[in-house]
Every structure is written in structure tokens, then in C-alpha cells.
Image (spheres, grey):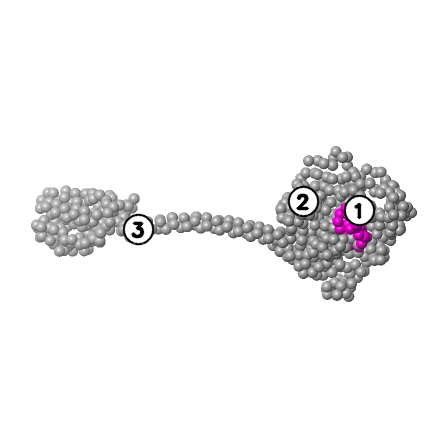
Amino acid sequence: MEKGYNIDDILSEVKKRREEAEAQIKSDSDEKEIVGSLVNDEPTVEPTTEPIEEPVEEPVESADNTVDEDEFVDASTIEEYTEEPEQADEPTPEQADEPAPEEDTANEEELVDAQALVEQEEPAEEPLVISMDSDSERADRKEKRKEKKKKKKKKKNTAIRVICILLIIILSACLVVFLYVNNALNQVTDDDNPQSTTESEMAMDRLIENFQPIEETDAAQISSLQDMIKQWYRNGTPASSSRVLNILLVGEDTRGKDVLESGTRADSAIIASLNADTKQIKLTSILRDAYAYWETTPGDESTGKFDKINAAMSTGDIHTYINAVENLYKIKIDNYVIVNFTSFEKIIDTLGGVELELTRAEINEINNHPKRYGKVYIEKTFDGNKGTLKLTGKQALAYCRIRKIDSDNMRANRQKICLSKVFSDMKDASSVQLLKILNDMVPYVRTDMSKNNIVKTAKYALKEGWINFDIKSSNVPEYRNDESGAGGIFYGAWCWKADYPMDAYMLQMDIYGKSSITLARTRVDYINCRERGFYSELGYPTTETILNEHYGEVTTRPAEETTIE
């Protein structure tokens, strides 16, 4: 470690040795001893840690106490010392010119100037350098160490601040999303609605079923198609399972932000059934022109009405429509979602459009009737009679509404094709797109699901991977090849005749994998039977019947298996 020397002590020692040297020079016999003593004896001044003051030139007193101006010792010339110098260096030219006392001229070549001991040249071996740092240098080093520590501390504090800022941003984002979603849910839900269903709030991880047996009325007690439909509407209760979630999607023929729960017809309706056991989503379109019966006040026959099924919502409300669907198809509707056409367009536009296969006839139908399809034009860019095009929201909506060139059945098929493609595209949608879809849909959606129910269902859907479920579709009424006469002008309007008991049986089998329905031995020929008349009034049955070759087959599980906790 470097040491410092006090200049005052050095000068004092130099003075002392010079005096001794001058005294001993007088004796010729002691000259060599004096010289050796002066060469080998180094100052033994202890180092000090006190600040080194700026050296001041002081005169060196001679033996007779007189001051010799030529013998001033300049402290600036004292630079380095070696611990063990082997020999004294030759005096510098300046030192050689120094005048010596008169009595010492004869021995001047042997005289060792004390100043030479101080101003030695570098030794042959590497010397131990004694540092004589100033206060400013030590202060600089200390300041550098402090600065280095400050930088390390600053980096650490900066990292901590960055982490804190990130946490604040994340928490703020979560809060914003929560507030946004909460506000959005407040707009689309009605938690105060006393008729809001709660079955889907049950945990889907356990099985709770209701499959009360239903026996179809034999044709011997039915007089007409109206009689058959009415008796079936009032027969038994809908089936349900906690492992299956049935949501009725209703599309209203309204524009802007009007979402009505009554006073409007259901332009389209699809039952979306999510089965947690089969990992399948079943989309079942309800043909809006199906001839049906419903009661605006359930259980009150005086409020009963026959008409196309989509009119149930206009003569009553959404709950009237749901009751008609439940009682005619014998499945429990857990919840409903009402959307209008504007939301449908916005969803597709947010996804960047949808690719669908169109025929030349479908494109011509849309382009030739701009008023009917919202003044939409689709450019045919493929060769041949059909090809794939990417449609905007308005174009896709026009495609879903086509029915003049074929039938309402084909119209329902187009809707399911488009909806299935939208579901598929949403699997690959980014979080930003999904959030935008939610934002765009909020003003145009109405549901009976509570906020708590929506959150629970959404969490369960993510957990079970509903977005990856297989999608299958069908229509009700479901018509076979030999039932081409089911559609036509009946009851003063174009409508579909429907075999509701058979349709309900088939739908239960598709959704639940089993049915609570046992079809009658002798069934009504619903296409050829009379249109009006009730057995309770006429007293005679219809003569148009068909024989059920599968009568008596077991279609339900044993009673002990219907409820499993």
C-alpha cells in the first residue's frame, strides 16, 4: 500500500545529516565512514496520513548558523524514494556546481551531498513507489466509488420502478376490462327479470336429468292436424340435462339498435345445444313458416293461437316463443339471446369478412332485387355456376336471407352454413378482434342470462374448450324424401306442415342421445289429414293414418339412472 512522507521531517533530517557530514569532514580518518553512514542510512520518518501542504522553500543553516542562499532545498525536487538503494547516484549538474565550504575543497569529490540522497535516480530494481497523493486525488477516488455505488443502486431502483409500473398497468388494464365487461353485461342482461332461467347456472360437472316419459296420443283420438298439434303442445314436459346447455338464438328483422323482446317476428331462430359429454355443438334451425300452436298465457287455452311459429313472439313475447319451442319439441331452453341484423353484419366485418360458396342463381337473386336485400351487390369473380367468394357483413346477411329461388328450408341451411363458418373463423380470431366483436355486439344483443351466469358459462367454456367442439346442424321440421307435400298454401298462407311428435323424438336423440318420447302405434298422416276440427267437438278421428313399425321400443334409460350426483 502506498505511504506518504512529511516534507518537514525530511528537511529536518537533511539538515541534521549535513551538519554531521561537515563536522566529520574535518577528520581525514573518518571521511569514508561518514560517507558510508550517509549513503546507507535512509531517513526513517514515519508516514503520516495528514494532508500534505504545499512545500515552501526554506534556507538550510550551515554549521556556523549562517544561512547559505545557494543551499536552499526545493521540495518539488523530492519525488521518489527506494526502500533499499544499493548506492548513491551521481549528483546532478546543478548539484555539481554548488559551492562547498572553503575548508572542504580538498575532499569535494568525496563529499556526499545530502541533497543527492533525496534526488536519487531510479534504481536498477523495480522500486516501491511511495505515493504522496493529494487530498483532491483521494477525494476523486472516493467520489468515483460513491458514484459507482449510486449507479448500481439507481439501476436496482429503476428495475423496481419498472416492475411496479408494469404491475400498475396490468392491474389497471384488468380493472378497465372488468368495468368494461361489467358495463357491457349490464346493457345486454336483465338481472331483475323474474322469468330469467337459472338452470344453466348449475355445475355441468355433475349429471342431473329430467326425462319424464311422454306417450304420443293415438290417431284414434285425433281428428285433424290442428288437433294433433294442440294435444302434443299440452302433452308432457320438456326433457333436460345439466350436461347439455340449450340456448335459443333469435334473429330479429330490425335495424339500428332496436332489440325487441315482443311485438316483432322472429325472422330466424336456431337452437344451439352444447353437449359436454359428446363435445359437440348442435345447431338446429326452426323454420319460421312451420305451422304451430302456442298459448300467450301458459296453461290457458283461451289464449291459444294457431299461426306460423315465428309469430309467437309478435302475439306474445320472447317467453311465449320459448314456450312454443319447448312444448312442441320437448326440450328445455336454458337461455335465449336476441340479436338484430346489424350485429350480425358487424361481427363478420370485424373478422374481415367470411368466405362462402355461392351459386350463380344466388348472386343473381341478390343483385336483381336490391330493395329486398338492402341494396347489396355481389360481383361474380369465378367461372361456372358456383364458386367461393369473400363476403362483407351486408353481403353475407343478404345471402342468409335468400329464399325466393328455392325454399325456407334452404334459407335455414344458408344461415347455418354462414354461422358455422363464423364460429370457425372466431377460433383463429385475436383477442383484439374478439374484444371488438364484444364491443360491437353490445348495443344489438339482449339476453336473459345474468352477469354471474355469463361469467360462469364463459369460464366453463374456456376450461372445456367449447370453441373446438364439432358443429353439426339440422332443421325442424325435418322432412324426408317422401314428404315433399309438407310445404304449400295451407290455412290461407304458405306454410310448412310439421310432424311435431316425430321431430321432437329425433331432436332429443340428436341432442341428448336418448328420448323420453314413445310414439303411438297408429299415427296421424299429417300431410294428408284434414286441416281443422277437434276430436272433443267432432267425436270422430281422422281417417288418414300411418302405422308405426317401431311402436313400443324403449327409448329412455332406467329410472334409477336419470339422476346421478
Q: Residue at x 77, y 45 (%)?
A: 330
Residue 385 position, x and y percent, is: 79, 61
Number of the label disc, if any, that sits on residue 198: 2
Q: Mark 3 points at which residue?
A: 139
Membership of 292 in magenta stretch: yes
Please state which of residues 441 and 482 is positioned toward the viewer in this rendering: 441
Give the number of marks: 3
Q: Are marks 1 and 2 in contact (CB under 8 Å)?
A: no
Q: Earlier in the sequence, mark 3 or mark 1?
A: 3
Q: Name the residue under label 1.
A: 233
> In the visual, does 248 lie left or right of 138?
right
Q: What residue type is labelled 1?
A: Tyr
Tell me the SS state at disc 3: helix
Q: Which amino acid does label 2 sit on?
A: Thr
Give the CA distance from mark 3 to mark 1: 99 Å
Please state which of residues 107 and 355 is positioned toward the viewer in this rendering: 355
Q: Which of marks 3 and 2 is nearer the N terminus?
A: 3
Number of the label disc, if any, that sits on residue 343: none
Give the CA distance from mark 1 to mark 2: 23 Å
Q: Which residue is drawn at 19% across and 54% down?
A: 56
